[in-house]
Amino acid sequence: MRAPLARLNARIAGGKTRLQDAENEIKRISERRLAELMKRSERVRFEQLDDPDLTKPDRAKLRRSIAAGLRHGKLEILVFRGHFRWRRVLHWLRYRGLTTVVAAAIVVPIILLMVIARSNTGQVFVVPNAVTLDWKLPSGAKEKTSLHVGDRLVVISSSGTSHVVRRWIKNQGYATSQFASD
């Protein structure tokens, strides 16, 4: 019983080595074919993308080499080799200009809105001492209110020790007042 098992194991080991040898030969053939194609033009390389002699990794290398040849450097426009070529500018605008314009059209308004929101957002200020303030209500009327230690106000703007503060009055709007701090 051991002899057939030993023969079976020997055949399996021999099959594994033959399989490994065959895989190595396929890789060598693919690498040779890839080296041959890399010497040719992009058009020929493109036509040979589905070559059955190429393995998947070598086919990916071929695709990357074609893609690298199609890419144009962003700074290529700025490089003057003797004279400036308008064709380069037009080519760059055709393929990257639209993307730049779209990105700017999205980013610039977002940044503007963020700056406006930041400038219109007040800072919360905790009242350190009891104080009485004269408030100008949204209706235009004036009102005097006493604030206690720990009450919170929103500081809209400040210059030196003088601050403009506001508070929300439900169903009316913001009331504003001048507040001087020490």
Image (cartoon, rainbow, N blue to C red):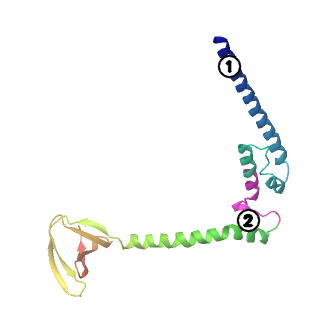
Mark with earlier residue (1, 2): 1
What are the residue bounds of the magenta stretch?
64-82
* Left or right of 67, for residue 147: left
Residue at x-position 71% and y-position 48%: 60
Depth check, front residue: 69 or 134: 69
Q: Position of residue 115 (x, y in %)?
A: 44, 71
* Left or right of 142, for residue 45: right
Residue at x-position 69% and y-position 16%: 7
The amino acid pointed to by label 2 is Ile
Real-space Cα distance between discs 1 and 2?
68 Å
Please tell me whether residue 67 is drawn above or below residue 127 in the rendered image: above
SS for callout 2: helix
Quadrant location of the C terminus in the rendered image: bottom left
Please tell me whether residue 87 is drawn above or below residue 33 in the rendered image: below
Disc 1: CA contacts within 10 A as few (<14), some (14-19) or many (>=20)? few
SS for callout 1: helix
Residue lying at the far top of the rendered structure: 2
Q: Which mark is residue 163?
A: none
Q: Position of residue 147 (x, y in %)?
A: 16, 71
Asked if residue 81 lies in the magenta stretch, the reply is yes
* Left or right of 1, for residue 67: right
- Find residue 165 and report its image quarter: bottom left
Q: Position of residue 138 (x, y in %)?
A: 25, 84
* Left or right of 128, for residue 45: right
Q: Which mark is residue 8?
A: 1
- Find residue 41 and report its image quarter: bottom right
Depth check, front residue: 98 or 126: 98
Depth check, front residue: 95 or 140: 95
Q: Position of residue 13 (x, y in %)?
A: 69, 22
The amino acid pointed to by label 1 is Leu
Residue at x-position 82% and y-position 43%: 33
Residue named by callout 2: 77
